[in-house]
Amino acid sequence: MFQGEGMEQSSQNWFSSVETPIKVTGRDAVSWDESRDLVVVGFGGAGVATALQSLDNGLSVIALDKFAGGGATIINGAVVYAGGGTSVQKEADIADTADNMFNYLKQEAEDIVSDETLRDFCDTSPEMIDWLQDKGVKFGSTVWHKKTSYPGPEYFVYHSDNSLATSYKKHATPAARGHRGYVPIEEGRKATNLGYSIFNPLKQSALDKGLQLETYHEVRQLVVDDNQEIIGVMALYFDNEKLLKKYQKLKQRAERLLMILPPILPGYNFFAKRAMAVLEKAKALEAQRSQKMIEAKKGVMLSAGGFIYNADMLNHYAPKYNASLPLGTEGDDGSGIRLGQSVGGITDNMDCISAWRFINPPLSFGRGFIVNKHGNRFIDELVYGATLGVEMVENHEGKAWLILDKNLVKAALEEVSGGKALNFQRDLARLNVWFAAVKSPTIEGLAKKLSLPAEALKVQLETYNQAARAQNGSDVYEKSDDDLVEITGPFYGIDISLDAKLFPCPALTLGGLKINEATGQVLDENGKVVKGLYASGRNAIGVSSKNYVSGLSVADCIFSGRRAAQHISGH
Ligand SMILES: Cc1cc2nc3c(=O)[nH]c(=O)nc-3n(C[C@H](O)[C@H](O)[C@H](O)COP(=O)(O)OP(=O)(O)OC[C@H]3O[C@@H](n4cnc5c(N)ncnc54)[C@H](O)[C@@H]3O)c2cc1C
């Protein structure tokens, strides 16, 4: 029996408009509207990589997207994680090897994929950058060498991970691996909506190679034959031009509202709510769509993104992250994952979320210390922001406060002024210092104002200051001596909890369908492949499904999409 049938019976766990599969005796039993070798469901990063590699291999491909295409990929920060001696790293004089990259990434990926897959990912990383460049993607080679969550617009290669943190350095020599797609300097100041620099050249290459792209086509059902093979999909689309135009206009209006502020800034939610109201109007039109049956002669690729925009699904799988800010697009509704489940595909790591608690820049924020609700420190404050965010949520009830002093606050404001930081980094730092920070001349007074245990906070302060004075690598969380400064009064405390009002914590989902790591085929509960069905990007378990560092999701989309394309094409 297909899991879809079981899921229908327990629909309280379904949370999706995806329906149970259409069962037919064989291909001839269906009157197909379209027929291609490969049907790509969801045209974002993973979808475009699958489509393009398949076209290069001589397949005919149709890509369907519920909306305009591009997904989270086109609105992202354009960082691709790559190393092992890429052409860009060489141009930038960055020494790196595939082994070194593997040793680093093993710490992030842990056992989410086999060592063989992780090695393959690292070994082929330079080739991936060559492939992207060959398809028209441009990268810059100016390097930012220090710790940062996102570099200034003039820098295109940086340590987009934990590689500079002492505890990670023990296992791998730091090498900058965040490759930013090239965008003009002024554009780069936004830090979001830059993914077009990666996505658009790939999309154009695919179109040039004969891709049939159908936007505003939502896949609702898979079609399965008597041999339990997936042979096509059913999509809903507007066959009335006027209705489609009206729908698109509403969508564009909502998108404009969503772009007024970057998601990380408070105030974004205000516009997001207005956008959602517009989207509700668009949704009402969806009832008037028609059905289209599309045959897949060689395979169906599920590449429809994560599920962070599906609040019910998030609450079901990862309720600890309910208070986070969804980072993605409306397309991240989990429908790709549900489509896979509807035919028996199984999922993994659905509770794994990447929560971005980026505090640096300003670097001086990272030089303060962070405590949980018991007043205890729990981390090297200058680790990668998602490492901090996940630790805060998983092990400290999502509660944390950043403790600074007057000197650090002054330095922080200076570090974000005069164009030295990106606008959203500047605004976030200022907002929190000016409107959220609690101040007190004494640590006991600060503890009282923050409702934290005074004794614990005092002990943390003393221990932190001892390590800062000693400068002998004695910090209990291995924070590097350069970043340890003695903190003296007056003291400042900033709420950086998951639900902090002025410090939103964006999050995206990492779990997905279990796949055969050599081919990208979806697996069922017996570990057998679901014939004709593939998954990639955030629809699937991949290299970035345990811990995300900047660029790893897009790199995994390209890697997993191309890998499946090779199998579908019989290469
Ligand atoms: C602001 C922001 C910044 C980020 N920065 C980075 C970064 O710099 N580097 C990095 O690696 N990651 C970054 N991420 C995360 C990364 O962008 C995503 O994890 C990644 O792009 C997901 O790619 P995907 O191909 O799996 O899905 P997407 O790119 O989201 O594509 C999925 C597509 O499927 C479509 N779809 C959904 N359901 C259906 C359906 N039923 N039928 C048809 N189509 C459907 C959607 O409309 C969408 O177009 C960022 C994310 C955001 C939001």
Image (spheres, rainbow, N blue to C red):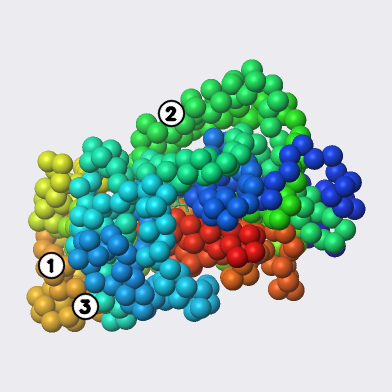
- Nearer to the camera, 228 or 133: 133
Whole-number angstrom distance, CA of label 2 to CA of label 3 = 46 Å
| Among numbered discs 3 and 1, the one appearing first in the sequence | 3
* Relative height, residue 192 to residue 534 (above, below): above
Identify the amino acid type marked 2. Arg
Identify the amino acid type marked 3. Asp
- Nearer to the camera, 73 or 351: 73
- Is the CB atom of the residue marked by disc 3 within 8 angstroms of ligand 1's nearest atom? no
Along the horizontal axis of the image, is 220 left or right of 269?
right
Q: Position of residue 359 (x, y in %)?
A: 28, 55
Whether the residues at callouts 2 and 1 have beta carbons within 8 Å, the answer is no
Q: Nearer the viewer, mark 2 or mark 1?
A: 2
Q: Position of residue 548 (x, y in %)?
A: 43, 62
Q: What element does badge 3 sit on?
A: loop
Along the horizontal axis of the image, is 540 left or right of 442?
right
Q: Give me the residue at 69% from left, 21% from top.
A: 240
* Relative height, residue 40 to residue 118 (above, below): above
Q: Which residue is mark 2?
A: 256
Q: Which residue is mark 1?
A: 485
Identify the amino acid type marked 1. Val
Q: Residues within 10 Å of mark 1 (few under 14, many from 20)?
A: some
Whole-number angstrom distance, CA of label 2 to CA of label 1 = 43 Å
Q: Which residue is mark 3?
A: 475
Evaluate whether residue 74 shows in this view.
no
Q: Position of residue 48 (x, y in %)?
A: 52, 48
Whether the residues at callouts 2 and 3 have beta carbons within 8 Å, the answer is no
Q: Nearer the viewer, mark 2 or mark 3?
A: 2
